[in-house]
Amino acid sequence: MAHATSTEPAGSLAPLALHGLSVEGVNQCVHCGLCLASCPTFALLGTEMDSPRGRIFLIKSLAEGRIALTDSTVNHLALCLDCRACETVCPAGVPYGRLIEAAKAEIERERPGGLVRQLFRRLNFGLLLTRPRALRLAAAGLRLYQATGLQALVRASGLVRLLPGTLPEWEALLPLLPPRAERAPLPPLIPAEGRRRARVAMLTGCVQSVVFGAHNRATARILARNGAEVVVPEGQGCCGALNAHGGDHDRAVEMAKRTIEVFEAARVEAVVVNTSGCGAHMKAYGELLAQDPAYAERARRFARCVQDIAECLTREPLRGPLRPVPMTVTYHDPCHVVHGQKIRKEPRQLLAQIPGLSVVDLKESDWCCGSAGIYNLTQPEMARRLLERKVNHVLATGAEAVVTANPGCILQIQAGLRERRSPMRVLHLVELLDRAYGGRAS
Ligand code: SF4
Ligand code: SF4
């Protein structure tokens, strides 16, 4: 927490900070309340302290040392999705995402929880996300668990319900692991087709690379088809987004530095990302590393190169020919694309270029589906309510598929549709584009 130091003139205060991270942005809030109607947790709970304005008040009070991290304070802050819908509508430009990440880092330091929780966090944040080999090994184990029918047996027997804490929810959300060939790394270089327009690098991601390797392959094919020489830097790992959102700040900083080093060596014009949380987080590396003299400038330069796949593909019209995809779809905006990166029209522009595709509007398309990083695992009850609301709107469209651009949203909405026994599919934007190009996703 912030305190005035003896070297400062009387009356001056040190910058407001939590866990050493500036939360000065709280002072930008003019308490107008314009954000309240856009906040999913306020909409569901109706309490001021579960609104952006209320949480900003809590963060400011914490940083000024006027309140303590009581159970109630922790709960209000932990219920925040970090969806940043409040940022989109805030007329005062409050950098809410940065404030809540600082608060979550402070909570983790002051209230780390019991041994089981700490071990679980260390396993995920410290081992699986930081060591790609460990993640691949875990993915192979999970694939075996699923392919042998053991998972179905365990689920049918009800044994899962005996697991402690929120582990039953974790188990229910386990993604279906694809066969080994789909989890294999991409080649280090994919040449451009036709006249070369650009040389770009691709982030293959952590969970993305083992669960949705097919999306990475489709992304690389579409980029190459559109004249990009695609570099897939070896040694890349997790960008640290999940760690940062989960309050694991120090490790997130180390992961950011490593990511910058790996991609700098690739000497490319842009770093293309097909997972929204990663893209939004990497675009904020400049702020994350602003206090590190060795990395501040490199981080700012790197962040300027990061492009979401939709952003990258709309810089020029898509190269044809594109085959018809006769389907009716609707589009769900992932929070970290629409609010985190302010990308709203680009995915729709891409869909509009696919012949035969009909796109119908989705009510509250930019409302969080409840996935929100690991929110559906840490706050299963709220996540379930948000998912139900999302699935109701999705089903009301009558579309054959819902298109989105984030692995977390895909898994969450798939789980919701499965529960309602709906045949509606959830597709990544690149799957549809790849289909239009006659790629493997077709
Ligand atoms: S809209 Fe912005 S300024 Fe207004 S209350 Fe919300 S965070 Fe504060
Ligand atoms: S980030 Fe989302 S859940 Fe959190 S306060 Fe803002 S709008 Fe509400």
Image: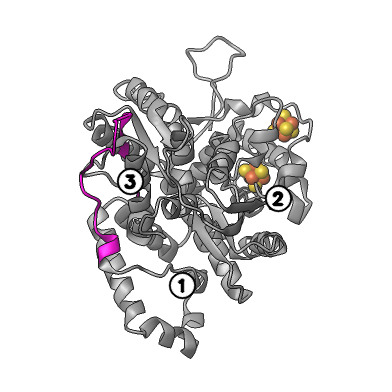
Q: If the picture is divided into quarters, which one holds ligand 2?
A: top right
355 versus 415 height, above or below: above
Q: Nearer the viewer, mark 1 or mark 3?
A: 3
- The magenta-colored residue range is 181-206
**Residue pictured at 47% horizontal, 90% vertical:** 157
Question: 372 or 244, which lies in front?
Answer: 372
**Residue pictured at 52% horizontal, 38% vertical:** 102
- Report the Cα–Cα distance between label 2 and label 3: 31 Å
Q: Is residue 377 visible?
A: no
- Disc 1, SS: helix
Is disc 3 surrounded by few (<14), some (14 to 19) or many (20+) residues within 10 Å? many
**Mark 2 residue type:** Glu
Residue under label 1, please give it: 171
**Mark 1 residue type:** Glu
**Residue pictured at 33% horizontal, 55% vertical:** 209
The label shown at residue 220 is 3
- Report the Cα–Cα distance between label 1 and label 3: 31 Å
Instruction: Tell me the quarter of the image containing the C terminus.
Output: bottom left
Give residue 286's position: percent from left, percent from top.
42, 26
Residue under label 2, please give it: 364
Q: Earlier in the sequence, mark 1 or mark 3?
A: 1
Give residue 432's position: percent from left, percent from top.
48, 53
**Residue pictured at 36% horizontal, 23% vertical:** 301
Give residue 322's position: percent from left, percent from top.
45, 47
